[in-house]
Image: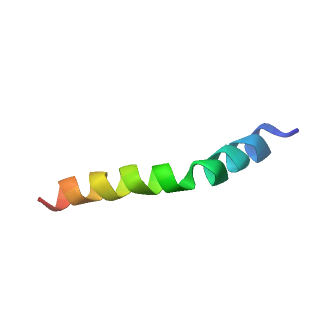
Amino acid sequence: MEPYVRALEAYDENRGLFNEVFDEFSAGLDK
């Protein structure tokens, strides 16, 4: 399997976690 396909699958599996971290990071920048 192509590495980028694996990366996309890993992202899809952990999208919720990534969004959570990104939201917290964005909130930190807004303060």
Q: Which colour scheme is used?
A: rainbow
How many discs appear?
0
Measuring from the top left, give residue 5's x and y in whole percent: 78, 46
Measuring from the top left, give residue 19's x and y in whole percent: 45, 57
Rendered residue at 34%/59% (across/down): 23
| Left or right of 4 in this view: 13 | left
Rendered residue at 72%/48% (across/down): 9
The quadrant of the rendering that contains the N terminus is: top right
| Left or right of 31 in this view: 16 | right
| Left or right of 31 in this view: 15 | right
**Image quadrant where residue 7 sits:** top right
Rendered residue at 55%/54% (across/down): 15
| Left or right of 1 in this view: 18 | left
The quadrant of the rendering that contains the C terminus is: bottom left
Front one among 2 and 9: 9
Above or below, comparing residue 8 to residue 3 in the picture: below
Rendered residue at 19%/53% (across/down): 28
